[in-house]
Image (tube, rainbow, N blue to C red):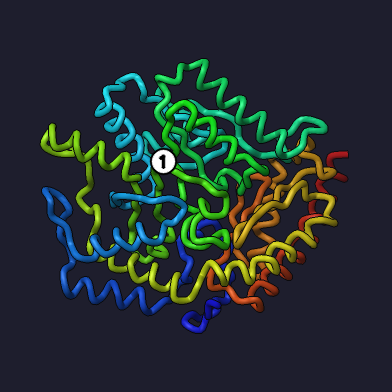
Amino acid sequence: MASSSTHQVPSLIRCQLMTLLKNMGGSEPRLVKAATEQLNKLPFYHSFWNHTTRPSLDLAKELISMFTAREMGKVFFTNSGSEANDSQVKIVWYYNNALGRPKKKNIISRTQSYHGTTFISASLSGLPTLHQDFDLPGRFVLHTDCPHYWRFHLPGETEEEFATRLADNLENLILKQGPETIAAFIAEPVIGAGGVILPPKTYFEKIQAVVKKYDILFIVDEVITGFGRLGTMFGSDLYNIKPDLVSLAKALSSAYAPIGAILVSPEISDVIHSHSNKLGTFAHGFTYSGHPVSCAVALEALKIYRERDIPGHVTHVAQRFQEGIKAFAAGSPIVGETRGVGLLIATEFTDNKSPYELFPFEWGVGEIFGQECKKRGMMVKVLGNLIAMSPPLIITREEIDKLVSIYGEALKATEERVAELKSKKN
């Protein structure tokens, strides 16, 4: 079980989505030591023209060994999750050109998804705020349904029936566009920044059957779900996803150094290797790809995840976290749904527990709750009338009890404020 003996409990409990990066908290000496030693040894060397460094080689081997949902062949390093997802599309295009399929270029993503803020990754994202006045998304991106059962299921429709309908909708979209034009489907195991949306039962089983049927690559975005957040090392393990390509970042280095990575299946890497030999090179990369300091820090972070069994620790404390929050939310008249897994949870504020009776945006119910939490020493991520919580993975049971208590107090204060706003409206 993980120990928190290497960190000091802060006076302000940070449960914001930004702590999705800092799995090890803010003062892990082993990560500082790894960075310092590498800076003294070799602060930088590039990864172009068949050159690289020992930390990047060791990290690539460790990532391939650690990802067990299916066999992976190669690793491509980036500096962020946005760059990873951006690079995924270029890899997919290059792959299909190598196979003589120049029309197979469109990418299907999902509404409410988040994949980054570069031109390509923001296009993949299904959040309108990332598109407005940026002339996005690009024409090569199509969006299919968000798998949010509570909000989008039909009357009397079970989770499995909902999943079947969404898989059918995906297949219909593919057939409408032409399977020969669809290159890949990208998805987060759990939608993170788009509202902590868990897949309904049998969803990924059905979705994978559709994309496999039409020879469409599956890109899994593990930037948020990777390295223990859900109680498994990767979200793919929890939901039995067998991807062709994987995007990693954030907790890869526990945010102590910027780094992202792509895991590439042997089938794809073999085609790219063969084609690049014909062209002379695979002409894509970044100055700081595989930066030795970032790789050294990430390699040490992975060692800690394994040595301390961080996924096991998350599983051990997650029930207390999830049940504690949901116990307060269940009896609240202003909470529509509380949803989560592992050490990730969201509370969506609606009236009468209905997905359709939304509070006026100008009331700022989520912001009211966020401020009430902050007054009591806890920070949460506010997303309109929704708040998300993602504490560091080294959190103890005692710290969970503290944040659950603050949640309950803040919720009661928010209920009182909403009651005041309602009375003024009436």
Q: In the displayed structure, does residue 76 sit left or right of residue 408?
A: left
Q: In the displayed structure, does residue 286 sit left or right of residue 206?
A: left
Q: In the displayed structure, does residue 407 sit left or right of residue 207?
A: right
Image coords of residue 273 (percent x, y)? 21, 40
Is 320 rendered above or below residue 110?
below
Quadrant occupied by the C terminus: top right
**Residue sticking out furthest to the bottom:** 5
Crowd band around label 1 with a 10 angstrom C-alpha radius: few (<14), some (14–19), many (20+): some
Quadrant occupied by the N terminus: bottom right
- Give the residue at x 24% y 56%: 290
Q: Nearer the viewer, residue 414 or 222?
A: 222
Q: Nearer the viewer, residue 54 or 30?
A: 54
Q: Nearer the viewer, residue 420 or 191?
A: 191
Image coords of residue 210 (percent x, y)? 53, 30
Residue 238 visible from this viewpoint? yes
Query: Where is mark 1, residue-wise?
Result: 117
Is 299 rendered above or below residue 102?
below
Q: Circle 1 — which element?
A: loop
Image coords of residue 8 (percent x, y)? 51, 81
Is 237 rendered above or below residue 140?
below
Image coords of residue 183 (percent x, y)? 40, 28
Q: Quadrant of residue 35?
A: bottom left
- Give the residue at x 30% y 35%: 90
Q: Quadrant of residue 325?
A: bottom right
- Give the residue at x 73% y 40%: 150
Is 79 rendered above or below residue 294?
above
Q: Amino acid at mark 1?
A: Thr
- Give the residue at x 63% y 64%: 374
